[in-house]
Image: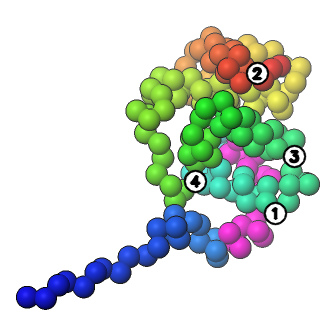
Amino acid sequence: MGRKPKEERPDPRWAARADDQLIEDLFDFDFGPHMDAVRRGKRDDDDYTFKLLVWFARDRENMPEWALEEIRLRFLSVLRGASWREAFPLPWLPAPTDDEIRSHTENKKLKVGWAVYRVLCDNPKMSVAKAAAQVCEAFGVEPHYGEVAYKELRDRFWIGH
């Protein structure tokens, strides 16, 4: 009996990267309306972060302020201890589990807080209570929950309105 030949495996460095054609296709993609709809919760997109980064790489000079601010805040979260996978989830990397990061309740509170923050960025004169009321229906929570979630997020990441 001879030795079994070693199985050919793809280089793991390449297995975890985006397809070049996908990136090239996205260089022709009209990011503005799509990303704005995703950001406002009107459209779902599992590749949101990936598209945000391609948009930044392709055309950062013409990106709206909210998109640049989102990237800036994600970098700040890494500097404050978040993992890169948490701050910049990419479709070809496994999503970090709740056990690796935080509980389901904490994750929901962060999502609600960020959604309130985005509404406030678009409407700087709007009160936190009104922004929370606008967002919370989509998450199935009370507006007070949204206010608390936003205030905790604001205090944690030094953002403010």
Give the mark nearest the N terminus, 3 or 1. Answer: 1
**Which residue is under mark 2?**
158
Give the spatial CA distance, label 1 vs label 2.
29 Å
Q: Is residue 133 visible?
A: no
Give the spatial CA distance, label 3 vs label 2.
21 Å
**Which residue is under mark 4?**
90
Residue 24: give x, y in percent of width and height: 71, 73
Crowd class of label 2 (few under 14; some 14 to 19; many from 20; radius 10 Å): few
Q: Amino acid at mark 4?
A: Leu
Q: Amino acid at mark 2?
A: Trp
Residue 153: give x, y in percent of width and height: 67, 21
Q: Amino acid at mark 3?
A: Pro
Residue 7: give x, y in percent of width and height: 30, 80
Q: Nearer the viewer, mark 4 or mark 3?
A: 4
- x 87%, y 24%: residue: 124
Image height of 21 relative to 80, above or below: below
Crowd class of label 4 (few under 14; some 14 to 19; many from 20; radius 10 Å): many
**Which residue is under mark 3?**
64
**Which residue is under mark 1?**
58
Screen quadrant of the C terminus: top right
Q: Which residues are magenta?
A: 23-40
